[in-house]
Image (cartoon, rainbow, N blue to C red):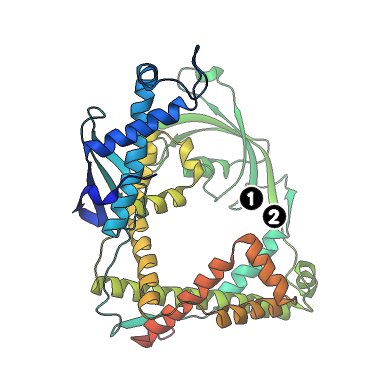
Amino acid sequence: MSIDGSRLQISVEEQDRWRRRVSVTVPSDLVAEEHKRAALSVASRVKMKGFRKGRVPSRMVESRFGGALRQETLDRIIKDAYRHALSSQELRPISEGEVEEVDYADSDSDLRFAIVFDVEPIFTLERMGGFAVEQPVAEASDREVEETLGRLQEQNGAWKPVEEGTPELNDTVSVRIRRLDGDEGEGAEAREYEFVLGQGDAIPEIEDAIRTLEVGASGEFTVTFPDDFPDEERRGQKEEVEITLDGRKVLDVPPLDDDFARQVGEFEDLDALRTRIRDDLQREAEERSEAAVRGRLLDFVIEANPFEVPRSMVERYVDSVLGPQAEQLPAERIEEVKANVRPQAEAQVKRLLLIERIAETRELQATEDEMDERIEEIAAKNDTDAGKVYASLQKSGRLEALEREIMERKVFDFLKSQSDIIESTPA
């Protein structure tokens, strides 16, 4: 049985950023009734010597379980009254309610409490078009194709030891480094390292020193820690070290020919591999270009229709970005990272809310026919049955993501139709 919601005194205070504070007063007689029900509930569950189960007098229950009764009464009333308050005020929380300022003397007095929470933001869109947006050039260059081929060569190369000459950039070196100053001085043990020169694994002056050595040779050097060194206390400090070059390897890459193309995939020749790379790069360039247009359009609409987003939504987005690994950081470091992420998180939450609002006001949600068509496309592309694709998406929980993908495409098609999209001139 629930309390009589019509007798509750409810007031709502609108705070900033869609925060609401609901204050509730529950009359004393309703409190007494709930307290009595709680006592009967406890009495029906407890066993006391000399009484049958469920027959323990209320006064003895009060005497022995007063604290538990008080808490159970509070929990029941606050939960029930909160539900009535939300219903009567037509409020839709999007965050957990936080109970505060509970005023409850005893079962014969009124109960007063307040709960704060965020509600779903509601905003109007007065302008969604009339903007001029420049679309970046989407073109895969010859340089990008050759760079990709170069990376494929490196991935399929083999490291070979070299006994002559000094190391060059992109060589792998095996070294021992021993500090010559500090507390240990000449007695310090050398530490072994292996890394690729030019990849930022060692400070620049260490790499410069290594590049002066032949394999098997040693040298003493004075190195200075750079201003961007991770350990702030060591920035700018000088250190005397002895470096021994134990080994050097160079990357032997396969020749760029038809055999190489057949080695990395099912390609007839090098031209076929180049064509595939260019097609892939072109598609990526077009996706980046489209993403730039979409982002700028959203920014324009947000600037024309400013609105605030609930803090709770921003915090949830921040937590999702940081992930569970953030729990391994010190508390002060976590807050520092969150502070850096919040501006971007708030901007992204605004974009998400804006897309949903446009879809709602313009009725641009995905239809069943559009979902079926998209699933058919996926099935055809993967040479499988549409039913299997649907079952797989449903099992993995990705149907909603597919539905949102279609909705977002329709939203952006609408936004682009309302503005001028100006193609950039190739350089």
> Which amino acid type corresponds to the residue marked 1 in the rendered image?
Asp
Q: Name which residue lies at 32% across and 44% down.
A: 3
Q: Is residue 309 above or below residue 130?
A: above
Count up the numbered dots. Answer: 2
Residue 344: quadrant of the picture: bottom left
- Image quadrant where one finds the C terminus: bottom left
Left-right relation of 87 to 156: left
Is residue 117 visible in the rendered structure shown here?
yes
Q: Position of residue 44 (x, y in %)?
A: 48, 27
Q: Position of residue 75 (x, y in %)?
A: 36, 36
Left-right relation of 18 to 223: left
Which numbered disc flags the more N-terminal residue, 2 or 1? Answer: 1
Mark 2 highlights which residue? 251
Identify the element where label 1 is drawn. loop
Is residue 233 visible in the rendered structure shown here?
no
Identify the element where label 2 is drawn. strand
Mark 1 highlights which residue? 171
Question: Which sits in the foreground, 424 or 71?
Answer: 71
Q: Name which residue lies at 60% across and 74% down.
A: 145
Q: Position of residue 172 (x, y in %)?
A: 65, 47
Whether residues under marks 2 and 1 lie with C-beta atoms below 8 angstroms apart, the answer is: yes
- Image quadrant where one finds the N terminus: top left
> Which amino acid type corresponds to the residue marked 2 in the rendered image?
Leu
Q: Position of residue 189 (x, y in %)?
A: 59, 22
